Structures are given as structure tokens and as C-alpha cells.
Image (cartoon, helix red, strand yellow):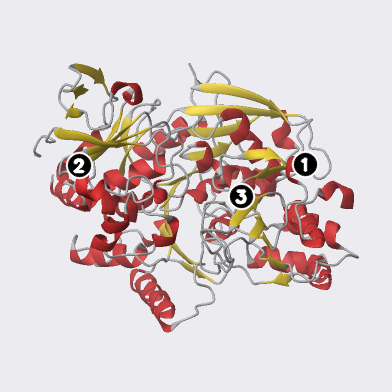
Amino acid sequence: MSNALPNLNGRVAFVFEERDFDVDQIIGVKNIKIQDVAELAALAMQSYDPEFQKKVCPGDVVVGADNFGYGHPHYPPMRAMRHLGIAGVIAESFSPGYWRGEISMGFPQVSCPGILGFVQRWDDIEVDWAAGVVRNLTQSKEIAFEPLSRADRQMLEAGGLVPYLKQSSVA
Amino acid sequence: MGYTITEKILARVAGLPSVKAGDEIMAKPDYVIAYDFPGYTDVYFKQMKEEFGIERVAEPDRYAIFIDHMIPAASPKEEELHIGTRKWCAENNVPLFERKGIGHQVACEVGYATPGAFVVHFDGHVSQLGTFGTLAMGIRRNILEAFVRERISMKVPHTVRVNLRGALQKGVMARDVFHQLVRVMGPSSCRFQVLEIGGPAVSTLSTEGLQTITGLAMFTGAVTAIVNPESERLQYALSRARKKLEPVVSDPDASYAAVHDIDLTNLEPVIVIPPTPSNTRNLTDYLGIEIHAGYLGSCASGRIEDMRAAANVLRGRQVKPGFALNVVPTSNELMAAAAKEGLIGALVEAGAFISSPSCDYCFGRIATMTANQRAVSTGTLNVKGRMGSPDSEIYLCNAAAVAAAAIEGKIADPRRYL
């Protein structure tokens, strides 16, 4: 009933090494109420890499540490990151509130214990959903990630919560 | 092998003889709860109609809406949101609770904390219904699923069991217990799991205190918290329950992902330093830091025992001039009880500003701190900007410690006033 999830193929555009990372820091708490996505995108990552916008390419991913998204995550930071072309987040593990929120936006999240030591910034990687592995193409190695639950997978395949619910209310 | 209370509740709402942690199920929530908030309820109400063609919810008594944010409204725009909410509830015949207090507390008062029930909300602090043996989960935007369908898709969570033992010392409160759990177990210790609170100390902790502990469960990574309900809790909840359900409890041989034993005997008052709820420290290591504001309230704290603790500290003393102490009882029922007990009078006489119940002091709406100001707070969070400028700071602590700081204008040990 749904298309298979396309593999993620891109570079590791940034590695957030801090555990319990509060994603609001990506745009800065003082900007959290901004709605305009272009404005948000211009502010994103400024305290981490002021050149981020110039370096990032569509399809790139970011990598996080344990309990990524802890605190009180808001949606604008990842709206900004998607606008810049970020196609997904791979982390050692995720905080549930963040995870649910972003999956419901149709934004791929990959829980992959070991990812921090497995990639370096700007490595080329591939997330192969069917094989259940993240491949580091730069370093020619692969690592297994934790499978998505059925509902999470269907939600990502559908492109987010609303299309998912529309699809399954007919099915 | 036995079952956890969570597995038992979810088996019933999935219509299955039994379920085990890890099973993917379709569960029918007994209650679907939300508060009106821009970008949330107004969007769901619109989406239901426009995207899903749902004009009326099928079983209106399964739904409950609270108006507790933006109370009182401070602009026509906020009032418009409330008007839209009132209209939707009236059209759908859905119960609406407005200006009764903070919804998670009011939900307990009006019987949604039915022992054995399964409740969903978009806001995770609904977990405090777990005090009464209710499985109550905050599922963020996925709540839309519960508005447009009878059942929601979910995975049965594993459970982390925490056995509490030992009695609390004077000046130590449930608030300290929760933050101690985060310190001992870690902020991701219960990720995607249920935090089940048990052990001999549970019967000595107050119902209010357990609401504090369960209501903050998300900061251990838990999807909710739950207590096997016993005497005082059952008495409270069953007399108010909106539905007749057989209360359930975990089997002695239930299977847990982890079991922690935590002794509360030597626990001291703690303080959670900015900017994350994972930073629990001993309060005594931070004495003397200058503080400009204090907030006693929120869905987590702001109940009778919190106001009583603050009044005990402040009675016969005065809030330091220039220090802004805001006390916001969690609900009208609690505010009235506090007034009868003389707590409101004692706090006002000491110089506290008392507001009627509202979420607004906690979620960043009444957030006035300027750069470099600091607050002590019983609010839910100490992240940057939650009470004003991103360059202000929030220290979380118990209600007695908020009162002690209000007297001294700096972080102070409440035990010297008790």
C-alpha cells in the first residue's frame, strides 16, 4: 500500500557529540518563536559552524549522541534543518518526545548505537532501510541500526502523520 | 511470568487476552485529553474537518478539553482561540473544563484518573495520572490519531521498576525525590519505557507527592510513570472515577527491563541547575547564589503540601524587598483548600503574589526575567528562556527552598526555617 522508504544517501554534515542534546540550541532559544522557515534556516547552526549553510547539500544527514532531543524540543530547529536539505538524523539514541515529534513530521530518524565512533564529519554514508544498516562509504564499513516500529515506518513512508492517517483510514 | 500494570491495561484496551512489552498493538484510549493551544487543538479541529471529513467525534465522553493556558487571556487573539475551543466542544458535546486549574491536576479531580484506564494527551505531564494507576501518555502530535480514529497504533513499552524505601527528612520533598531519581538513574534511563514507582516508601509518600514524581517522568526519558494504586489513592480516584473499571496492579513476577532500589533516608534538598533538567546537585553546594524571582506552582508542584511547606518557611517572615515571589496554586479546588487552611493568607502576608491557577507562569508566557536575572522555581523545566531572556537562569528546587530563597534573595537552605 505504500512505497518503500528511499535510502538516505549523503554526507555527515555535522556531529553533535553532546549527550542529552537540546535541539533548540540549533537555532538558539531566543529564536524559537520565529515561524518563517527561511529566517530559521539562516539562523541555524550559527553557534556551531557559521559556514554551515554554504557547506550543506540536500541529502546530507546529521549525527547525534545518546538521548538526542532531550529537554523540551520544539519543531522550528528541524524545520530549519530540513529547509537546508538535511534528510535525516542518526543518533546513538533518542529522547522519546523528540523522536515522536519528528517522525510525525515525516523526518527520518535512525537509532544507531555506535554511530558516534563510526563516522566522521563529511563522510559519505548511506542508510539502507531494507538491510537495516548504516554504511560508511568513505570508510567502507557498515553498522546495524535499530529497526523502526511498524507504525513509525509507515508514518515515514507516508511522509508524516497526516498522510499516514489518511492512508490507513482508507486501508 | 506475570504482567506489569502497563501490560494489563494495554491488553484490555487492545481487546486482547494479554500483551507483552514489545508487542505492536492498536489500542483504544479510554480518554483523549488536550488543552487548547495555538498550533495544536485549533489545528486538530481544522484537520479533522478538512482533511478527514469528521464533523463530530463518535464518542464525545471519551474526549476532554481543558482551557488552562492563556488564562486569563491577555489579548483578543488569545480569546479567539478559547472561543474556537468552546465552540468545538459545544458542537461535539465534548466536556470542557475552563478556568478550573491546570488540566493535569483537574483531570485527576474530575475523574479521568480512573484506575486501570488508558489516557492519551499531547502533553507528557499527563503522566501524573499514573499516581492513581492510570496509564497516561503524552504522544505529541500523534494525538491527532486519537481524534480521527478509534484506535491508535503503539508499541507496548517495557517497564523500569523503581523501589523507593526510607522516610524523607524534614525539608525534603517529593520534588527532591524525582530529581534524585534523574541523578541516580540518568536522564535517559527510562527511554521509551514506563517508570513504575513502588517499594515501601510509596505508602508514606503523599498522593500529591506522587503526582509530582509521576508528572515529571519525561525527564528520565520515560513515556509515562505509574504506581500500583493503593488505599489513599484508590479512595481518591474511585470516588471520582468517570468509568467503572477493575483496578489492576503488576504481578509480583512481572518482567522489568531494570529494577532500581533507591533509599531516601539520607536524601537532602536538591537543586537542578540550568540549563537542563538533568543537572541535579545538592542544594547546599549552591547556597548564596543571588536570586531575583521565585515561582511556586505548575502541574508538577503547587499543591497543598507545597503551599504548606512555603507557608511554614514564610510565616512571620517577609519576602526580601525587590524579590518577585509568585505563588500559583495548581487548581481552584486546591486554592480553595489552601485558603481554608490559612495558607493563602500566610503567603500573602509574607509578601507573595498569588495568582489564580494558570499554566502561564510555567510555559513561558508570563516570562519576564531579563538577562542575568535568576529564579528558583518549582516549574517543570529550567531550559533557557523558559522564564524570560535566554540569558536568565532557572534553578529548580522544592517549594520550601523557593520560600527560603524569597526571604534571603539567594539560594538558601529551607531547613533552617523549619
- Residue B206, image quadrant: top right
Query: Which residue is at the far right?
Result: B316
- The mark tally for this picture is 3
Label 2, on which residue?
A87
Q: Position of residue A25 (x, y in %)?
A: 41, 49
Q: Amino acid at mark 3?
A: Ala
Q: What is the secondary structure assignment of the residue under circle 3?
A: helix
Side of B148 relative to B224 (left or right): left
Are discs 2 and 1 located on one and the same chain? no
Q: Which residue is pictured at 39% across the width and 72% down the height?
A: B85
Judge the density around disc 3: few (<14), some (14-19), many (≥20) Cα neighbours within 10 Å.
many
Residue occupying the point 48% across, 24% down: B3
Label 1 element class: helix
Query: Disc 3: which chain?
Result: B
The residue shown at (42%, 66%) is: B36
Q: Which residue is mark 3?
A: B237
Q: Which residue is mark 1?
A: B284
Task: Measure how far apart labels 2 and 1 are at the Cα level.
Answer: 46 Å
- Is the same chain shared between marks 2 and 3? no
The quarter of the picture where residue B359 lies is bottom right
Chain at tag 1: B
User: Does B366 appear above or below B399?
Assistant: below
Kind of residue at badge 2: Ala
Residue B212 position within the rendered picture, expressed as x and y whole percent measured from the top left: 63, 47
Residue B375 to residue B284: above or below: below
Horizontally, is A42 left or right of B269 in the view? left
Q: CA distance from mark 1 to mark 3?
A: 38 Å
